[in-house]
Image (cartoon, grey):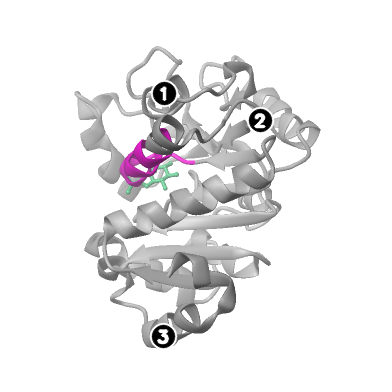
């Protein structure tokens, strides 16, 4: 794991966008794993800007989102499909047939989860997975107690997740209590992953994920097992990290990061 601390939310987000752009330029048919949430809005805005101003090309890119709410269809304003269309897909030159999210309206959820895994495999696996982190320590909707080898499945949402995401619903009581999510095992198979977290409210969970023990109570801690995982945070989200000066020193001295300093 590498931890990269940027001075503020904008700088952290721009760095992640630059890394995505570089991967996409190197491999135009990149299989990109995507996330949702407020943190991602700024990231997608930057990728849209790169598309409009710098011709960043998504025409061959294939995407798989981490998760979707059970019971919400693409037309529901709070569905993650809707979020993705609104923030990214409708604003770049991606082929909608290449964008994948679990179907929250599937009649047979178990079959939908198996089919989703199958589609990822057929695409050749995920090259780059972008992740946010919930305050419950989840990646995707892998709530506390999720098996560290879990695959895509339906999952009951933890009380803290309901509390964190309900304000995004005009009527907070309408928030679904379950999601379909890639499993921790699915995420760990991505060839590279980047977790973006910003803000003081993420500091304590980032410290647990990065420096705490690997535990199913904080599924982001499983990323410690990933061979190529970068955690990119702003100053605020880094402030509970014991080793932050050391991580800073590595970033400042690692030749690979030269173009991004
Ligand atoms: C939701 C998503 C997660 C995401 C989290 C963070 O719960 N299922 O994948 O990481 O939101 O949200 P935010 O960026 O709004 O803090």
Question: Which residue is at a point 26% across and 44% down the rendered structure image?
Answer: 163
Q: Is residue 21 magenta?
A: no
Structural distance between the alpha carbons of marks 3 and 1: 39 Å
Foreground label between 3 and 1: 1
Q: Secondary structure at mark 1?
A: helix
Say left or right for 181 vs 85.
Answer: right
Name the disc covering residue 243, or none: 3
Which quarter of the image is occupied by the C terminus? bottom left
Q: Position of residue 26 (x, y in %)?
A: 67, 47
Contact (Cβ within 8 Å) of mark 1 with mark 2: no
Q: Secondary structure at mark 2?
A: helix
Residue span colored magenta? 35-48
Q: Splitting the image into four quadrants, where does ligand 1 fall? A: top left
Per the image, the residue denoted by label 1 is: 91
Contact (Cβ within 8 Å) of mark 3 with mark 1: no
Q: Quadrant of residue 252?
A: bottom left
Mark 3 residue's CB less than 8 Å from ligand 1: no
Question: Against 45, is 69 above or below?
Answer: above
Q: Main secondary structure of the magenta part?
A: helix
Name the disc covering residue 113, or none: 2
Which quarter of the image is occupied by the N terminus? bottom right
Structural distance between the alpha carbons of marks 1 and 2: 28 Å
Question: Which residue is at a point 59% across and 19% down the rendered structure image?
Answer: 95
Question: Which residue is at a point 61% across and 42% down the rendered structure image?
Answer: 24
Q: Residues within 10 Å of mark 2 (few under 14, many from 20)?
A: many
Question: Which residue is at a point 64% across and 64% down the rendered structure image?
Answer: 228
The reply to whether residue 138 is in sight is no
Outermost residue, front direction?
Answer: 54
């Amino acid at each position: 794991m590498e931890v990269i601390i940027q001075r503020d939310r904008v700088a952290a987000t721009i760095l992640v966008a630059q890394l995505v752009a570089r991967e996409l330029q190197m491999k135009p048919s990149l299989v990109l794993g995507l996330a949702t949430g407020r943190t991602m809005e700024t990231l997608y805005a930057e990728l849209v800007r790169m598309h409009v101003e710098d011709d960043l090309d998504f025409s061959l890119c294939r995407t798989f989102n981490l998760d979707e709410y059970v019971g919400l269809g693409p037309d529901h304003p709070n569905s993650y499909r809707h979020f993705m269309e609104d923030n990214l897909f409708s604003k770049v030159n991606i082929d909608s047939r290449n964008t994948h999210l679990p179907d929250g309206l599937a009649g047979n959820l178990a079959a939908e989860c198996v089919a989703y895994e199958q589609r990822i495999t057929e695409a050749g696996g995920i090259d780059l997975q972008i992740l946010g982190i919930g305050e419950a320590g989840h990646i995707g909707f892998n709530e506390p107690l999720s098996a560290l080898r879990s695959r895509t499945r339906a999952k009951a949402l933890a009380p803290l997740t309901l509390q964190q995401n309900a304000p995004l619903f005009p009527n907070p009581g309408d928030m679904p209590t379950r999601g379909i999510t890639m499993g921790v095992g699915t995420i760990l198979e991505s060839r590279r992953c980047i977790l973006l977290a910003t803000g003081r409210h993420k500091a304590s969970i980032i410290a647990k994920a990065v420096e705490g023990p690997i535990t199913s109570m904080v599924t982001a801690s499983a990323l410690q097992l990933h061979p190529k995982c970068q955690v990119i945070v702003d100053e605020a989200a880094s402030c509970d990290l014991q080793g932050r000066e050391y991580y800073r020193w590595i970033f400042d001295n690692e030749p690979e990061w030269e173009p991004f300093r």
